[in-house]
Image: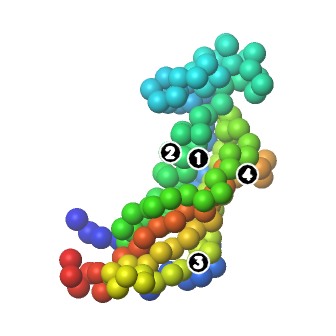
Amino acid sequence: MIRPPRTFEDLALGERRRSSTRSITEGEIIAFARLYDPQWFHSDAEAARESHFGEVIASGVQVLAIWRQLDHEINGDIDFVCGVGFDDMRLKNALRPGDTVYVTSKITSLEPSHSGKPRGTAMTLYEMINQKGETVVSFTSINLVYTAAARAVS
């Protein structure tokens, strides 16, 4: 396995990235919902017409799965230890069939480990934006990232 090339020292405060776009279909929303979140307004197109949304919408779980896919495209070159949490997550607008979205990231904080372990903490503000310029989801992701020193012991 080849580890991602960028370590904690390679990250820059304020660094911004943007993914390519991805379009969402009604079929994939329904298929995902039937497997993972079978609420009627996610999984039944006919019944969903009577919902507040007027059509099926992607579940929050699916929104995050799509975010993860697009995030890997733009930040998959970072040698993450793991993610440890999200702060201030907000689902601001529904993800609907026919929407086309992209993800942006901005590093808002970089903190070396105080435990002496060869890693640091990177806080990254993420947004998923639709074709109308509306934010679908936003949150700050808290991630541990290996330092260059971690490669010497691996």
- Helix, strand, or loop for circle 2? helix
Q: Is residue 119 left or right of residue 16?
A: left
Q: Identify the residue under disc 1.
A: 22
Q: Which residue is drawn at 29% across and 81% down?
A: 150
Residue 93 shows in this picture: yes
Q: Is residue 60 left or right of residue 73?
A: right
Query: Dot 2 surroundings within 10 Å: few (below 14), some, or many (20 or more)?
Result: few
Looking at the image, tell me whether mark 4 or mark 2 is earlier in sequence order.
Answer: 2
The reply to whether dot 1 and dot 3 touch (C-beta < 8 Å) is: no
Q: In which quarter of the image is the C terminus?
A: bottom left
| Between 100 and 119, the one nearer to me in the picture | 119
The mark lying in front, picked from 2 and 1, is: 2
Q: Identify the residue under disc 4.
A: 135
Q: From the top left corner, tell me how far across and down residue 31 is, in percent.
A: 50, 26
Q: What residue type is labelled 4?
A: Thr
The mark lying in front, picked from 1 and 3, is: 3
- 139 above or below 2? above
Q: Identify the residue under disc 3.
A: 109
Q: What residue type is labelled 2?
A: Ala
Query: Dot 4 surroundings within 10 Å: few (below 14), some, or many (20 or more)?
Result: many
Q: Residue at x 53, y 54 (%)?
A: 70
Q: In which quarter of the image is residue 77?
A: bottom left
Q: Distance between the residues labelled 1 and 3?
A: 28 Å
Q: Which residue is drawn at 48% across and 51% down?
A: 69
Q: From the top left corner, tell me how far across and down residue 33 is, in percent.
A: 52, 27
- Helix, strand, or loop for circle 1? strand
Q: Identify the residue under disc 2.
A: 65
Q: Which amino acid does label 1 sit on?
A: Arg
